[in-house]
Each structure stands twice: as structure tokens, then as C-alpha cells.
Amino acid sequence: MASTDTSISSCFPFTLKHVAVLDSHIAYIDTEASHNAAITAILLHGNPTSSYIWRNIIPHVSPVVRCIAPDLIGMGKSGKPIITYRFVDHARYLDAFLDAVNPNGPVVIVAQDWGSALGLHWAFRHQDRIAGLALMEFIRPFSTWDDAGGVQAQEVFKRFRDPVVGRKLIMEDDVFVKVLLPGGVVRGLTGEEQGYYSSPFPTVALREPVWRWPNEIPIEGHPKDVFEIAVKYHDWLLETDKPKLLFWATPGAFINPEKAREYAMKLKNVTMVDLGEGRHYLQEDHPHEIGHATAEFIRELLHQ
């Protein structure tokens, strides 16, 4: 049965598996459903989180389908190879990971933040395998800085993208993990939750992926390669009839109420879910609503 507990637990009730991927390894949750559901749910996190962010959501979804939730390379309990951690690097490791653990069959991508960019990039290139998309706070190509966020957010992320100031703030001062992450959760984070999210990044060197991510956000055509990738998957997202579930909240961050209304009109075959109050890390404020709606969404897909 799906979870009926409405509390937000800090407990991580899963045993992570590990698989060799390229020159490193990926840690991941795999519920290995005993039933024969045709669809697999792939849950993809963003920066600076890990599969831990899905801990209260998967118990709703796993009774319906197999759930796979990796820690992206350099994050969570996954390997920490010495690479640049650009978007294209993450895409290479994710491609290899999915080839290893789920090479065939239809999938539903459930994703937030950079997980959405990676998931949509994968979906665009594997359209025949996509049964549906469940998205929240997803990354799109931002034509202007104003489109990417409010004035305060713009100022912060412009500083992050400064090669000197940004590296000091994120790598030496650890502000992304210590300040932005809890600030993106309305209820805040408990000490145990904050500790879990902080544990993969105890040293300056290990915070390289956390620093790199803000520099990869596709804004005003930069970085050129990431922007071009985002345009392709975003154009496809607007055109495709694939079933979609889009969660949004107020005030939100990438997806504010105004943007949610816009997508409600532009997207085909979409179900919109208003979560109420929320910022960026919606899984930490509304895990049960997200889990229940995602399970119902996939259940309907299985009966089509």
C-alpha cells in the first residue's frame, strides 16, 4: 500500500545500490517492484541535493511502479571523479547509468531543478521510451535574466557566476548548501536533514559540482551549448502530446504562478497541480501531495 503518513520524515528508509558508470560509480535507490508494471519511474534531483529529497515521495509511488532515483555524479553518495561537472558531463554519466540499470521499456521522468534539465534532455533523445513527464521547478532556456528570477535572485546568481566571487561563496563559504538550500524550503530543514545534504560536500574540492551548476544555467544564450540543448528539449516539451504533470507553488522560483498559468495554456496534455505555498525545493514542503499525485498520474498511464 502507498504511505498514509502525512508527516515529513527525515529518515532515509532505503539501502542505496551502486553501479559502475564510466570511470566512477553511481549510487541509487531501486525499489525493484515485485509486480509487473510496464513503466519505470526515474526520479532526478537537482543542486545541491540527492536522492534523499525523494525519501517521502517514493513510498507513494513504489507500490505502483519500480522507482529508480540516482545521486547525480559528484553528488550524494555517488563517486566524485575529477571532472569539470558541466551539464554535458552529468548527461554522459546519467546516460550510462540508465543504460546500465534500465536499458529498455517505457519510463516516467519525475524531476526538479537540474534533474529536470537532464531528464528532459534524455527524454528528447529517447522519445519512444517516454510514457509521461512529472515536473516541478524545471529549468528552461531563460531568454533574459528577468525571466530567470526576481531582482534579488538575479544578484545572487550573477555573483555565483563570477569566477572569483562565486567560487569563494560556494566552495569556501558553502553558501549554496548552508543558505540557499534551506532558504528554498518554506518549513526550513531540520538539523538531520541539513546534515544529510551537507555530508557529500565536507571539503572545498568536493563542492566543485555545486559551484558549477549555477554557471550552467542557460541564460541569455550562455553557456552556448547548454542553452542550445535547453531550447531543443523545451521546444519539444511544448510540442509533444506526451502526458504531463506540472507541480507549481507560490511564490515558486523558476515556476512562479504567472509562469504556471502560461504553461497551463501552452503545454499539451498537461495536468497542473497547485501545491500552495512553496519556493524551490517543493519535495521538502509537499512530499505527500507530490507522491500521491504522481502515483495517480502513473496509475492512469498504466490503464491507458
Image (tube, rainbow, N blue to C red):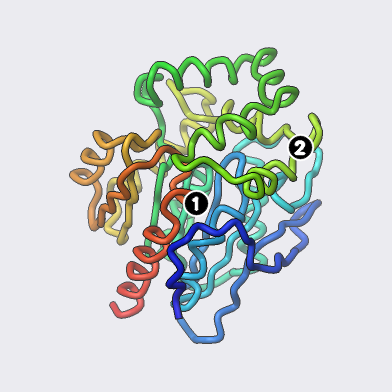
Rendered position, 40 above or below 217: below
- The amino acid beneath tag 1 is Gly
Q: Which residue is mark 1?
A: 119
On the picture, is 120 further left or further right than 189?
A: left
- Percent coordinates x, y for residue 63 in the rendering: 47, 78
Identify which residue is drawn at 56% across, 36% down. 181
On the picture, is 152 further left or further right than 47?
A: left
- Percent coordinates x, y for residue 235 in the rendering: 34, 42
Identify which residue is drawn at 30% across, 46% down. 276
- The secondary structure type at the circle numbered 2 is loop
Mark 2–mark 1 Cα distance, whole angstroms, equals: 21 Å
Crowding near the residue tagged with mark 1, few <14, some 14–19, many ≥20 C-alpha atoms within 10 Å = many
- The amino acid beneath tag 2 is Ile
Rendered position, 128 above or below 182: below
- Percent coordinates x, y for residue 85 in the rendering: 69, 37
Q: Identify which residue, 49 or 105, lies in the foreground.
A: 49
- Percent coordinates x, y for residue 40 in the rendering: 49, 71
* Quadrant that contains the N terminus: bottom left
Q: Identify which residue, 20 or 214, lies in the foreground.
A: 214
Q: Tell me which label, 2 or 1, sits earlier in the chain.
A: 2
Name the residue furthest left. Answer: 265
Rendered position, 296 above or below 240: below
Residue 71: which disc? none
Identify which residue is drawn at 40% across, 47% down. 136
Whether pointer 2 and pointer 1 mark residues with C-beta atoms closer than 8 Å, the reply is no
Q: Which residue is mark 2?
A: 83
- The secondary structure type at the circle numbered 1 is helix
Name the residue furthest bottom. Answer: 35
Crowding near the residue tagged with mark 2, few <14, some 14–19, many ≥20 C-alpha atoms within 10 Å = few
* Quadrant that contains the C terminus: bottom left
